[in-house]
Amino acid sequence: MQKCLLSIFLIFSLSVSGKSLSFFSSANNGIGYHEYITSVRGLGMGASGLATPDSVSLNAYNIASWRYMGITQINILMRLSYVQTEFPGQSFTTSTGKFSGIQLGIPIKPKSVVFGLSITPYTNVDYSITQKLNSDLGAYEENVFFEGSISRAQVNLSWSPHPKFGFGFGFNYYFGRIRDRYQLTFDTSENYNSNYIVEYQFRGPGVSVSFDWNIIKNIYFGGFVDSKPKLNFTRVINSPLTFTQEKISEKGKLPFLWGIGASYQLGPRVIMAADYSAQKWSEGFDISGVNTQNLTDWYKTGIGIEHSHENKRTNKFFNKFDIRAGFSTGKIGYLFNNDPVREYSGSLGFGFPFHRNTARLDIAIVGGFRGDKQKNLAQEKFMQIFMSLSAGELWFQKLR
Amino acid sequence: MIVNYTIPNDTTITTDTLLFNFDAFIYSGEIPKISERNYVATLFPHSTLLQFDLKSFLDMLPRDVSLNSANLQLYIDRENSLINSELGISQTVTLKLTKITETGVAVDSTLGKYIETNQWGSDSTYLEIKSGSSRKNLAIVFIQPQLINIDSTSGLVISIIEALSASQIITNQRDYYSYLAFYTTKDPNMALRPKLTIKYWLPPPPRL
């Protein structure tokens, strides 16, 4: 028998096509692209928003800021992504639409105690590629699908013992799965077509705390810490050789996620905000036998400004709705080609209040790029449109 | 046969009435064998048993693989073979053995599967599995079960399908006299030893 029976050297790649939320979400040792959306209002202000008071839209991370709510609010987020992925010599463009979270806040005591529920995407993996390849195996088509997500469900309570400050407490439950699927379809009957699937399942609890502090009249501070959730991690491999299912369960953890922000009310209807959030992904996920060589620390920092609508009837066009703009930068937590992948984006946002300011349609248009074709051997230019509908209604409270 | 006789004034034309000519011989004894060769033969059925060291192949793999195809190449000593001029090697097959021990050999007839091993290699020095789905079957039906149950004594047997013994009445065109001498697994020339080539796809390492 020949000693080395097959070496897979790809001779050439005939064509590439695919779809992706982000190519970088497929990173080895990774759990996908880290989602961080405080609110669509915050995205319009350069991914800030931890310390911008809001009585209509609900912040996904700073629960303490829910204390401004007077009536029950529900928030639904959607996103449309348009991504152009470029590799040296190749590029493709894709678009996807995704549900991006829901929050429900029910004031037990208006502007003091708010009970809430939310589901927020934590990471997302969505990348698929089809390649025509030629190797020692002959000509074949390789279809690769990386799909899945980890989400955070939260039951929370916001408490404001004083109008100047408030605290938020959340019980989190992380859940989700990521599935990597490889399909090889050969041009001839000589080869058996391969189908190989590895699924990673995650679930486990964690807690979070947050604060919101109106330190002086025009200045607000806010922040949050999500503890290290203890995860039950299961890897399920459908063996192509034995056709049996191999299931390995391990314990794991996600690193602390924390963020801090500040905002300054420049005028009656102009607010400026800046945030910094970070997570030490370089620590890895504490899963036995899994190294951290492709991981680096994740962070996102942003700054933005908002000109809000006039809270009365007006003929001036730019006073009828909120206008926001911002800029953000960060590292997505992965090394590609031993270099951290950086992301830069600019944003524009709009808020259209309705129903006597108890509801609002927020739109954020975020455009930018991540990665570098020389350093990371890949770059993505993206344009994302986020929409959130926040609607309010009086629940469980006596009408007076 | 012509018998000639003459009588005086006989005008009969003498002609050869022979219509057919047969070289008559009787099969007996054994095919002519030399040492250090494995044989397959008709009439005096011989089969070649083979077992490959799949354990060392398995040990060599970094992780689970997906088998795609396999090929068996058997080098033939043509000087010591008698290859039928009409049928050649068309009836040569590989079958699966349930066990390959000194005390007993059993063909896996329950599966009723065989793989046509009737294609000349590119330089006509070796016999190989027929191109196409036969190679896929060799990988999935024959090799994969052995890899799963690596300690089993299963193997392969190379035969000429439905070879008759010399004592049987020959009624079919395929019942011909033929034998192939294969170089063995111990041949000093490594290049002439039987070869099993397994093509597989190595999945990328798990992300976590």
Image (cartoon, helix red, strand yellow):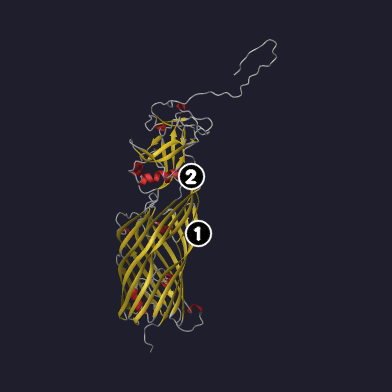
Residue A219 seen: no
- Looking at the rendered structure, whether the residues under marks 1 and 2 are on a common chain is answered as no
- The picture places residue A135, in percent across and down from the top left corner, at 46, 45
Give the CA distance from mark 1 to mark 2.
38 Å
Amino acid found under the numbered disc labelled 1: Thr
Residue placed under numbered mark 1 in the picture = A93
**Residue A178, located in which quarter of the rendered image?**
bottom left
Single out the residue that lies furthest toward the top.
B8
Residue A268: x and y, percent?
A: 41, 80
**Which quadrant of the rendered structure holds the N terminus of chain A?**
top left
Chain bearing mark 1: A
Q: Position of residue B123 (x, y in %)?
A: 49, 33
B62 above or below A42?
above
In front: B157, or A217? B157
Report the mark closest to the observer, 1 or 2. Answer: 2
Task: Depth check: give the residue in front, A373 or A271.
Answer: A373
- In depth, the one of A148 and B181 nearer the eye is B181
- Quadrant (top left, top right, bottom left, bottom right) of the C terminus of chain A: bottom left
Q: Residue furthest front?
A: B7
Could you say whether the residue bearing mark 1 is in a helix, strand or loop? strand
Q: Chain of mark 2?
A: B
Q: Secondary structure at mark 2?
A: helix
What residue does disc 2 label?
Answer: B133
Horizontal side of residue A62 vs B182, given as left or right: left
Q: Residues within 10 Å of mark 2 (few under 14, many from 20)?
A: some
Is residue A264 depicted above or below A255 in this figure? Answer: below
Residue A300 shows up from this direction: yes
Residue B69 falls left or right of residue A224 = right
